[in-house]
Amino acid sequence: MAAESKKRDPDKTRRRILDSAFAQMYKHGYQATRVDAILSDTELTKGAFYHHFPSKRALGEAVIDEVLAGMIEQMWVRSLADYVDPVVGIKAVLQMIPSMMGQQFAQLGCPLNNLAQEMSPIDEVFRGKLNRIFHVWIDSVSDALKRGQENGSILPGVDTHGAAIFIVAAYEGAVSMTKSEQSNEMMMICAEQIELYLESLRC
Amino acid sequence: MAAESKKRDPDKTRRRILDSAFAQMYKHGYQATRVDAILSDTELTKGAFYHHFPSKRALGEAVIDEVLAGMIEQMWVRSLADYVDPVVGIKAVLQMIPSMMGQQFAQLGCPLNNLAQEMSPIDEVFRGKLNRIFHVWIDSVSDALKRGQENGSILPGVDTHGAAIFIVAAYEGAVSMTKSEQSNEMMMICAEQIELYLESLRC
DNA sequence: TGACAAACAGACTAGTTGGTCTGTTAATGT
DNA sequence: ACATTAACAGACCAACTAGTCTGTTTGTCA
């Protein structure tokens, strides 16, 4: 049978909740995300929801741990590892992301930064989780730059940690401006300047 | 009489509401700001509040128009106008703001960017107001750079508009990282790199 | 096949929240 | 002094929201 919609699949159900929650949190933020909205979106009920998650907060934390962290891992950490030249790698990622996520990215910004900005001042647990992801990201950029120094594509004098922080910060700033403007124009202008900065790290 | 707390001063009352609302919105965002919280903070009542503002939304818009816009005007537009050398001016503002706003800035970030990130995807009116302020800010940086080109402190080849956008973006990114980390360390590291970028615009 | 637990269904609740409505009090102009 | 209105006071309400509780159904394993 093809239409086996009545069959139970707890793992899939949990995933659906997680995905719907991510979409809601991405657009409205954690606080403005409504459990009821997730329920009508997934066509599930209160019973199903609270069977899989003890609370809205637990769901929020699970979204960070199981969805968000994986996205950064996939988009940045793994991608950068593929390139010998970090400048080429970072440039490639910078152009891949907007095209991969499409219009949504210009409208909704960076899901990690969105949540970090909302939650950092009001919840230490959320902030800790989000900030740790930021540092995984920064470290992956820093590592790429270090490898570049070892293979002679990056100037030896470059402070890789400081540069990595700035690259992530500049990128987040560019995404923020893009979101405020609701147009990819801002992203392209900023990307140009970031690339200029990246070239200045070259040998 | 010194203690004239019973006297009525509608302008001052309105200001108190506006200031309290700004503080709440700065910390929690617009959506999570509660009218009741403003009332207990200002020790006013529902009657007073809804006499001065027809709705929470109108209050939010007033905070943007009357508080936020003024802050950017004061912090950036007026400050930059005082300097002949735009690089010196931007550097000075970059260091003035965190020291002026103190610990709050590292914890709560940039009030303009906070609101823009929260509201841009879900409310066109808010986004329009916030984005306009961003452009006033960008234009003031752009104008400073143009004056620098005229008086020979900035390279003639520099795209002042693009550079101005990037400076604001990089600054917002730096503030975001600082807020996520809850430490001024991020701000200082990024400021260093921004200054490096600024020097590259020099003659 | 029959017990037993996991997976779900959905009515219900207690606490919030923005906003309304009917007053009361202070200023202001005549 | 008196009328009139702006500025406020605060009880009240309807809609909403996270979470609970009592079931019912489905899978699993002996």
Image (cartoon, coloured by chain):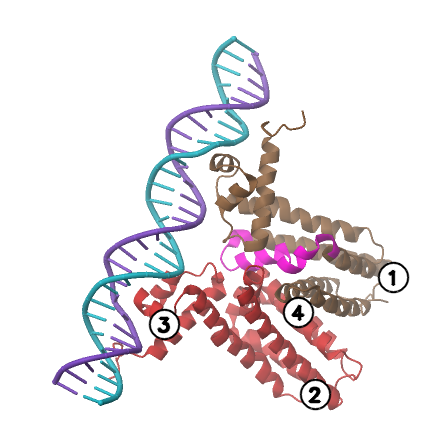
Chain colours: A red, B brown, C purple, D cyan
Kind of residue at badge 3: His
User: Above or below — where is B195 with respect to C12?
Assistant: below
Q: Is residue C19 left or right of residue B109?
A: left
Closer to the camera in the image, A78 or A129: A129
Mark 1 and mark 4: span between their CA atoms?
30 Å
Location of the N terminus of chain A (image quadrant): bottom left
Q: Which residue is mark 1?
A: B152
- Local crowd at mark 4 within 10 Å, few (<14), some, or many (≥20)? many
Describe the element under mark 2 as helix, strand or loop: helix
Q: Chain of mark 4?
A: A
Evaluate if marks 1 and 4 touch, with contact meaning CB atoms under 8 Å apart.
Answer: no
Closer to the camera in the image, B111 or B90: B111
User: Above or below — where is A162 with respect to B94?
Assistant: below
User: Above or below — where is A130 with respect to C16?
Assistant: below
Mark 2 and mark 3: span between their CA atoms?
43 Å
Kind of residue at badge 4: Ala
**Label 2 vs 4, first from the N-terminus:** 2
Q: Which residue is mark 3?
A: A52
| Residue at figure coordinates x 50%, y 68% from the top left | A104
Tag in front: 1 or 3: 3
**Label 2 vs 3, first from the N-terminus:** 3
Q: Which residue is mark 2?
A: A147
Tag in front: 2 or 1: 2
Q: Is residue A4 left or right of residue A84?
A: left
